[in-house]
């Protein structure tokens, strides 16, 4: 590959990292509280609200079931209203966040369901408020699973960001389409694929290590307190 093409590849990688990083941060900021709400508002939980749970769950499921490419096109008016344009990395971030938030919410809900119910009951018996149970019991105990869920989300966002490149979203997908497909330069397409694979491997490995460390920390804490681990 020419130095110019290497420069374009590095610029595209930077755009992809920016899209994925910002989207993951915003999706976590929105999705974690949403996942907590889905759990605690469920039947028999600490803030039981069946009607609210059904409505929120329906919205989450509807968003998750919409293919990303269709979602991205469908919300173009919203994207323009938020960032002022429908093309480029900033515009691609809007549908990425909307697609990832319900995904994060369901993964967080599933992680928190794995927390030992006995810990919640013990906290309630000691007079802990729902907010204290959420912040002192559920989230700390479910943190390894939450990190693992965010890792899965990051990997998915890398794939989504490449898909966004097909409609002018920028990043590695855009580079692969413009040069690898439209200009018939297979070496560019091959380079894009290699970089995406390496990026996914790096993110997955880092996320797995962080989740494993958090899990070991929880196990040690339970052992020190003489509490059975969840």
Image: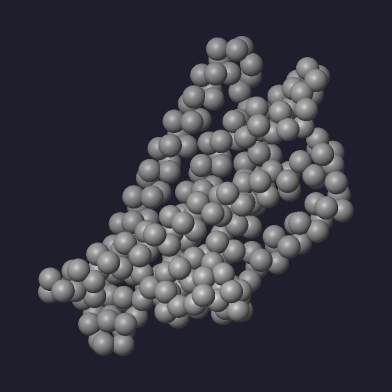
Up/down of 115 relative to 127, above or below: below
Image quadrant assignment for residue 97: bottom right
Looking at the image, which residue is at 23% across and 71% down?
8
- Give how far across and how far down residue 45 sits, in percent: 81, 37
Q: Quadrant of the C terminus?
A: top right
- Give how far across and how far down residue 223 sits, in percent: 56, 15
Colouring used for the render:
one colour
Image quadrant assignment for residue 185: bottom left
Looking at the image, which residue is at 58% across and 18% down?
222
- Give how far across and how far down residue 143 sits, in percent: 56, 36
Q: What count of labels does the image hold?
A: 0
- Give how far across and how far down residue 187 sits, in percent: 21, 76
Up/down of 101 relative to 147, above or below: below
Q: Is residue 215 left or right of residue 194?
A: right
Question: Can see residue 70?
Answer: no
Q: Nearer the viewer, residue 84 or 79?
A: 84
Q: Is residue 6 left or right of residue 156?
A: left
Looking at the image, which residue is at 34% across and 69% down?
172
Question: Can see residue 141?
Answer: yes
Q: Nearer the viewer, residue 227 or 77?
A: 77
Looking at the image, which residue is at 45% across and 78% down?
87
Q: Quadrant of the N terminus?
A: bottom left
Q: Is residue 124 left or right of residue 11?
A: right
Up/down of 186 relative to 172, above or below: below
């Amino acid at each position: 590959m020419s130095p110019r093409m290497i420069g374009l590849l590095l610029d595209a990688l930077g755009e992809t990292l920016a899209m994925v990083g910002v989207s993951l941060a915003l999706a976590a900021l929105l999705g974690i509280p949403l996942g907590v709400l889905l759990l605690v508002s469920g039947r028999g939980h600490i803030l039981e609200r069946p009607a609210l749970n059904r409505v929120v769950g329906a919205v989450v499921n509807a968003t998750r079931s919409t293919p990303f490419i269709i979602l991205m096109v469908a919300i173009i008016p919203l994207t323009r209203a938020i960032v002022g344009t429908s093309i480029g990395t900033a515009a691609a971030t809007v549908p990425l966040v909307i697609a990832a938030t319900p995904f994060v919410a369901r993964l967080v809900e599933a992680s928190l369901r794995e927390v030992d119910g006995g810990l919640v009951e013990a906290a309630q018996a000691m007079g802990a408020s729902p907010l204290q149970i959420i912040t002192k019991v559920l989230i700390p105990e479910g943190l390894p699973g939450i990190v693992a869920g965010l890792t899965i989300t990051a990997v998915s966002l890398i794939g989504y960001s490449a898909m966004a490149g097909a409609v002018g979203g920028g990043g590695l997908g855009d580079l692969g389409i413009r040069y690898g497909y439209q200009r018939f330069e297979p070496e560019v397409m091959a380079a894009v694929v290699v970089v995406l694979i390496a990026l996914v491997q790096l993110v997955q490995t880092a996320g797995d290590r962080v989740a494993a460390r958090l899990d070991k920390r929880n196990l040690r804490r339970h052992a020190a307190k003489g509490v059975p681990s969840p």
